[in-house]
Image (cartoon, helix red, strand yellow):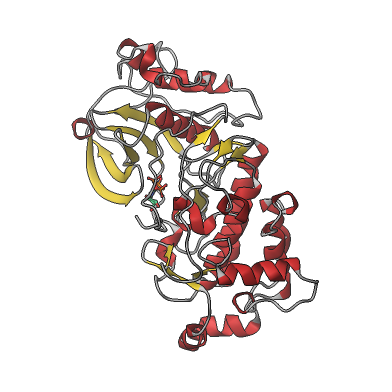
Amino acid sequence: MPGSVPSPGTGTGLSSRHLARLPTGYFGAPAAVGTSAPGHPRSLATTLPPTHWGPGQQRPLPLMVQTGQAVPRQELEEQYTVLEELGSGTYGRVVLTEPRDGGSPVVLKLMLKENTEWRAFLREYCIALCLSGHAACIRALPVAFESATHFAFGQELAPAGDLCTLLTPGVREGLAEVLVKRCASQLAEALDFMHSRALVHRDVKLDNVLLFDRECRRVKLGDFGLTRLQGSAVRAMSSTLPYSPPELCLLQGSDTLELDSSLDVWAFAVLLFCLCTGCFPWAVAASPDPQFEDFSAWQSGAEGREAPPSWQGFAYGAQEMFRRLLRLDPDRRSPAIEVQKYLSLPWLTAQDTGARLDGGDRQEAAAGSPQVPITQGCAPASGSGGSVRDAAGAGEQGDGSCSSGEGVPTPPAGTLALCH
Ligand SMILES: Nc1ncnc2c1ncn2[C@@H]1O[C@H](COP(=O)(O)OP(=O)(O)OP(=O)(O)O)[C@@H](O)[C@H]1O
């Protein structure tokens, strides 16, 4: 296959032997890697000086060095026909392609070199390869290359798009409970897998959950571009604002936070709320956002206190689940996998479920709801909810795997930059 990372025996290849050298408990079980055409492609080791890693950068992990040496230089159009653009994001595009020399279609994540450092590309690719062993993590393929303008790596195709495509922008209506629970169960497993290997995804959101069918029987977590080791120092990012926990929203300027899996748990709960209601629970988890202030008062208040309006459509068990996942104190937040305990309980009240079936009434009832509707591109409607502060600063530092300010563009100040 064109651009395949070469297999063992070529002297330059990424192999399961290389992957197996990773300490277990770091990235987890080695991913299975396929074979490729003999003699192809040429090794970057012969073309890249050691300075390719950039001045002052920390020593890369052995897996990244070995993988980097096996990434060939080639042009997209020479090897692939682009069939369709599947999505685009901060760093580039995701396209469905067909290898010109035959073979099955391949999804390529193309990352613009002007926005992406070599090291950031390799880190995302290596993490994706290592997580590929889990059924609920999108599978990376042993296909990667560098062109004049892009870095690229291959992924399996998620034929039904992402979770955003199941929600209608501006319509305050969520998915049927059974679909939400299917997503919840599979995503909880994916997060549990990552967290047990000390990895924090950091970008859990509707756009990053990929679908293999529109009934959500098979969904997978994707986009490991922001994934870092637990304990890394990270700054707030405005691009993840609606999903960011209060401890991250509170950071000022160049303040950093020690990365913990509880950050993903908060984002996961926000995502589940979105799926259930078609709305974000708040625009930002900080004062003076009124929905967040109501929620905080409920969280901090006595047991049995009435839920704020946005939370009243949930049955008691689901309210309890959300309160445990959305503890204001990150140390008291439940692990993601705890969601599984609530799957057998009803999540939505009978009234809410009924409205979901007959559609229109719920729209009217919800019109006066204080929730923050989702707009095109799965962002919260700007201007809804409380004032939105730009949690500027997208770098990270001291995490043992990256250096500050590395290849992470900052969205424009003051925006909720979730739209693609
Ligand atoms: N394997 C895939 N199969 C089908 N569609 C995909 C696949 N991977 C990504 N996409 C689509 O492309 C979009 C962007 O992908 P991805 O999140 O990996 O890019 P990104 O540049 O990192 O985005 P972001 O800026 O949101 O972090 C996804 O939201 C999804 O719609």
As drawn, which residue projects farthest toward the right? 303
Figure quadrant of the C terminus? bottom left
Residue sitting at 47 percent across and 23 percent down? 64
**Residue 85 x %, y %:** 28, 50
In the rendered view, tell whether residue 418 sits above or below residue 314.
Answer: above
Q: Residue at x 40, y 14 (%)?
A: 12
Location of residue 283 with respect to 133 vertically, above or below: below
What is the residue that sits farthest to the front in this orientation?
253
Could you say which quadrant of the image residue 271 lies in?
bottom right
Q: Is residue 10 above or below residue 130?
A: above
Q: How many marks?
A: 0
Q: Is residue 208 visible?
A: no
Q: Is residue 370 visible?
A: yes
Residue 308 versus residue 385: which sits nearer the camera? 385
Side of 94 where 205 appears, left or right: right
Q: Nearer the viewer, residue 351 or 139?
A: 351
- The percent coordinates of residue 4 (x first, y second) are 35, 27
Residue 371, horizontal then vertical, whole percent: 52, 74
- Residue 32, given in percent of the width and then of the height, sits at 51, 30
Which residue is found at the position 37% from the left and 30% from the top?
117
Judge left or right: residue 333 versus residue 176: right
Give the quadrant of the N terminus: top left
